[in-house]
Amino acid sequence: MSPNNNDSNADAYAFSEQVGHLLRKVYQRHMAIFQQNVGDSQLTAVQFVTLCAVRDRGPSSLTELVKATAVDQATIRGIVERLKARDLITLEPDPEDRRKVIVGLSDSGRRLVEETVPHAAHISELTLSNLNPGERVALLYLLRKMLDDKDE
């Protein structure tokens, strides 16, 4: 949106058209779709991602889960506690550093991931439902490009 000659830049700034606002609204829509369609009403999106990370990586330290999930250290600790309370993960001391904990997937956690993956695929489909196939590819490409940090 470009300001006209009579408006200051501040007056011409429409927050509702800014990338951050639009991303937040799309994320909120996706989270609502997730909760309505996940199948396990107690499972949050970030818990599911954490379970998937452990499934994909194998037993992992909290630091490894932070890197894999992009969830901060304090939050991942709470997620791990909640998943442990539901017996979806196992916690073992790190054999090399007993102060660290290694997170593994329990049998019930593995079953829950297997049961939830089809729901998750459907959730992605619902989230992208307003886009045609080319737009879907473009969106995912652009989101990955936005995440690409040249300094890392």
Image (spheres, rainbow, N blue to C red):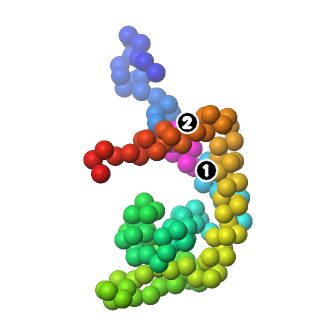
Instruction: Specify whether residue 1 is in view.
Output: yes
Which amino acid, by three-letter code, is at mark 2?
Ala
The magenta stretch is 21-28
Our reading of the magenta stretch's main secondary structure is helix
Q: Is 21 on the left-hand or right-hand side of 43? A: left
Residue 30: assigned label: 1
Q: Position of residue 37 (x, y in %)?
A: 71, 59
Q: In this view, does 118 lie above or below 134?
A: below
Q: Does 150 sit above or below residue 113?
A: above
Instruction: Pick out the residue farthest to the left.
Output: 151
Quadrant of res 138 = top right
Q: Which mark is residue 46?
A: none
Q: Mark 2 points at which residue?
A: 138
Q: Residue at x 39, y 70 (%)?
A: 64
**Labels 1, 2: front one:** 2
91 lies above or below 52: below
Is residue 26 located in the magenta-colored stretch of the structure?
Answer: yes
> Which residue shows up at 55% across the image and 38% down it?
139
Query: Does residue 152 show up magenta in the picture?
Result: no
Looking at the image, residue 18 sits to the left or right of residue 136; the answer is: left
Left or right relative to 26: residue 97: left
